[in-house]
Image (tube, rainbow, N blue to C red):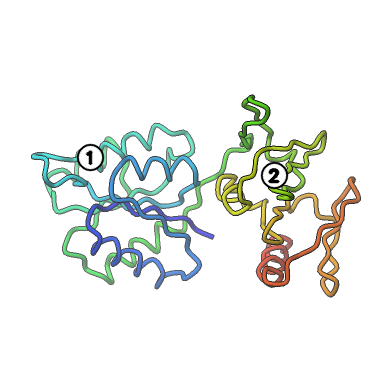
Amino acid sequence: MKKVLVVEDKMEAREVLVRLLKEIDEGTAVYTAENEDEAYCIAMKKTIDVFLIDIILHPEQTGDQSGAVFAQHIREVEKYFFTPIIFITSLYDSQMCMFHTVQCYAFVEKPFDLEKTKKIIMNAMRYHTEEGQEKSFIFHTNGLLQSVPLHEIMYIESKDHKLYIHTTREVFKIPYRSCKKVWEEIDSEEFQRCSRGTIVNMRYIEKIDEPGRYIYLTTSGTVIEIGSTIKKSFLDHFKKRLF
């Protein structure tokens, strides 16, 4: 699933770009931000494959090029060294500078030529940003800040208003946080929700009983039930991962 971040201060322009992205691929995860602060938070929490950035995010400020400044900061993040950046702009004179300093993939001039814009985005979406191999999940427990490498987490479950993180070594109990929220924070294709209150690391699945809706994990012998409403999407993702 491709992840695209649209950074555009005008709601109408954001809606046009989101619609184009969904026309290209309905399954694309599209995130939107109207300023650089919102965009940076999203870029740090997620792993973005393509950026669409309006150069002028604060038109009320004379000479504003905050979108370009944001792009320069993004290039300083290691995982985004080569991620395609498409600038949305009417500032033709700034183009050559941006090609050199930010290594811009393309420019889209306003007002949009919809077909031309769609082709540019389609080509850029062929790229995939690699996720860091040593990514960790950070959380607070007993007043301490702890970090667990994602590859050590077998599954996470919510129970009795607590969240339990089951790793290959031990179980951590932390104050309640919704599984959906934690899943979004982890942002890894290896982890999938198999029920409303459970997230499983796909690499630890030994076998699945489809009729009975049970997952059997390797080494631990743990059996996890798959939620009836999530069953189809979970199995589709599991099969896609296998092949």
Single out the residue that lies furthest toward the front: 160
Camera-side mark, 1 or 2: 2
> Residue 99, how many percent across, how many down?
26, 42
Of residue 191 and residue 170, the one placed in the foreground of this image is: 170
Mark 1 vs 2: CB contact within 8 A: no
Tell me the distance, in whole angstroms, between the alpha carbons under discs 1 and 2: 40 Å
Sequence-wise first label, 1 or 2: 1
Q: Residue at x 67, y 64 (%)?
A: 237
- Give the quarter of the figure containing the C terminus: bottom right
Q: Residue at x 67, y 56 (%)?
A: 192
Q: Amino acid at mark 2?
A: Leu
Q: Label 2: which residue?
A: 163
Kind of element beneath mark 2: strand
Q: Amino acid at mark 1?
A: Ser
Q: Label 1: which residue?
A: 66
**Residue 173 sits above or below residue 211 on the image:** above
